[in-house]
Image (cartoon, grey):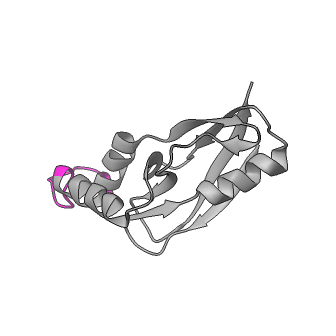
């Protein structure tokens, strides 16, 4: 297993990590198989979506903010309940197939690390499945 270090600079931020995951794929010598990407944090997530147009991620951030507002009468004492909820919505893991040593992503797809309680130093775990 490999660990990617990710530094976020904003409270909510989508960070494209496909290039770094591809580098890990080469480092691990994966030619055909599946990579598991896992976020070991309760206020962050990982997802795959369009990476070509940055407005897609801005729209996602805006929609999540509307669905899970900062002040919603939450009971959690740390004040970061919205971050916990958003991480549940996005999820903490994705599987990415690999063929011929390349990540099998669609033409416009990007892997994103989703920060909801930043800025922070975070970790994304990358593991070969099987």
In the figure, 44 relative to 101: above or below? below
State yes or no: residue 80 in magenta: yes
Q: Between 47 and 11, which is closer to the camera in this rendering?
A: 47
Q: Residue at x 66, y 47 (%)?
A: 125
Q: Between 25 and 101, which is closer to the camera in this rendering?
A: 101
Q: Residue 17's x, y, as percent?
A: 58, 58
Q: Residue at x 50, y 70 (%)?
A: 8
Image quadrant containing the N terminus? top right
* Residue 79 visible in the current orientation: no
Q: Residue 108's x, y, as percent?
A: 46, 51
Q: How many labels sit on residues? A: 0
Q: Main secondary structure of the magenta part?
A: loop
Q: Between 101 and 11, which is closer to the camera in this rendering?
A: 101
In the figure, 97 relative to 85: above or below? above
Image quadrant containing the C terminus? top right
Would you identify the image quadrant in which residue 101 lies? Answer: top right
Would you identify the image quadrant in which residue 65 lies? Answer: bottom left
Residue at the extreme front of the image, as rendered: 107
Magenta residue span: 67-81
Q: Between 59 and 87, which is closer to the camera in this rendering?
A: 59
């Amino acid at each position: 297993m490999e660990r990617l270090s990710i530094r976020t600079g904003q409270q909510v931020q989508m960070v494209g990590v496909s290039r770094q995951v591809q580098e890990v794929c080469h480092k691990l010598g994966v030619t055909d198989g599946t990579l598991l990407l896992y976020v070991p944090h309760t206020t962050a997530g990982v997802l795959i979506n369009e990476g070509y147009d940055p407005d897609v991620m801005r729209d996602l951030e805006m929609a999540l903010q509307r669905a899970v507002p900062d002040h919603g009468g939450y009971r959690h004492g740390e004040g970061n309940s919205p971050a916990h909820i958003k991480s549940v919505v996005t999820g903490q893991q994705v599987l990415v197939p690999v063929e011929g040593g390349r990540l099998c992503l669609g033409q416009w797809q990007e892997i994103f690390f989703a920060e909801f309680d930043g800025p922070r130093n975070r970790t994304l775990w990358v593991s070969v499945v099987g």
